[in-house]
Amino acid sequence: MTITGAPTLAGMLRLVDRLHERTQAWKTQALLIDLRCIEHVPDPTSQALVGEHIGSRLSHLRRIASVVPEAAMTGHSERVARRTGANFRVFGQEQAAIAWLREALAC
């Protein structure tokens, strides 16, 4: 899934809720979210809130990967999501994210 534009915090939280609904019946337990085309990097508090929501709403998935511009990698959302139950990682390279997701599918 690719996210573009200038999503608000409320919009990102709604997106996570929609992903929760859509992924409940997925046989493939992996999700890739591409954030490289968003117009701004959310502030650290917003990143942490999104990470917490990912942890609470998407922890049923085996792995969730997000791709962001390397300069935008902070670790805020990843740390919080992992603490709240999601196997979530943020990558600066799409190929690395895909490889990590495929590892889960191979098991």
Image: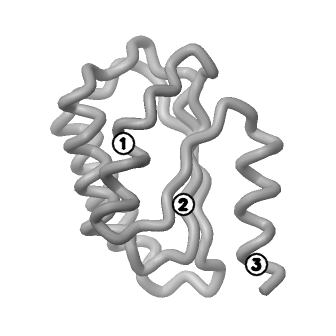
Of circles 1 and 2, the one toward us is: 1
Which quadrant of the rendered structure holds the C terminus?
A: bottom right
Please tell me whether residue 50 is drawn above or below residue 53 in the rendered image.
above
Amino acid under label 3? Leu
Of circles 3 and 1, the one toward us is: 1
Disc assigned to residue 67: none
Mark closest to the chain's N terminus, 1 or 2:
2
Amino acid under label 2? Ile
- Label 2 crowding class (10 Å Cα cut-off): few <14, some 14-19, many 20+? many
Secondary structure, mark 2, is: strand
Q: Position of residue 21 (x, y in %)?
A: 33, 73
- What is the spatial separation of the Cα atoms under label 3 and label 1, in whole angstroms? 23 Å
On the image, which quarter does residue 44 sit in?
A: top left
Q: Count of labels shown?
A: 3
Identify the residue under disc 3: 105
Secondary structure, mark 3, is: helix
Q: Residue at x 31, y 22 (%)?
A: 42
Q: Which residue is drawn at 61% across and 69% down?
A: 30
Amino acid under label 1? Ser
- What is the spatial separation of the Cα atoms under label 3 and label 2, in whole angstroms? 12 Å
Mark closest to the chain's N terminus, 3 or 2:
2
Identify the residue under disc 2: 64
Disc assigned to residue 77: 1
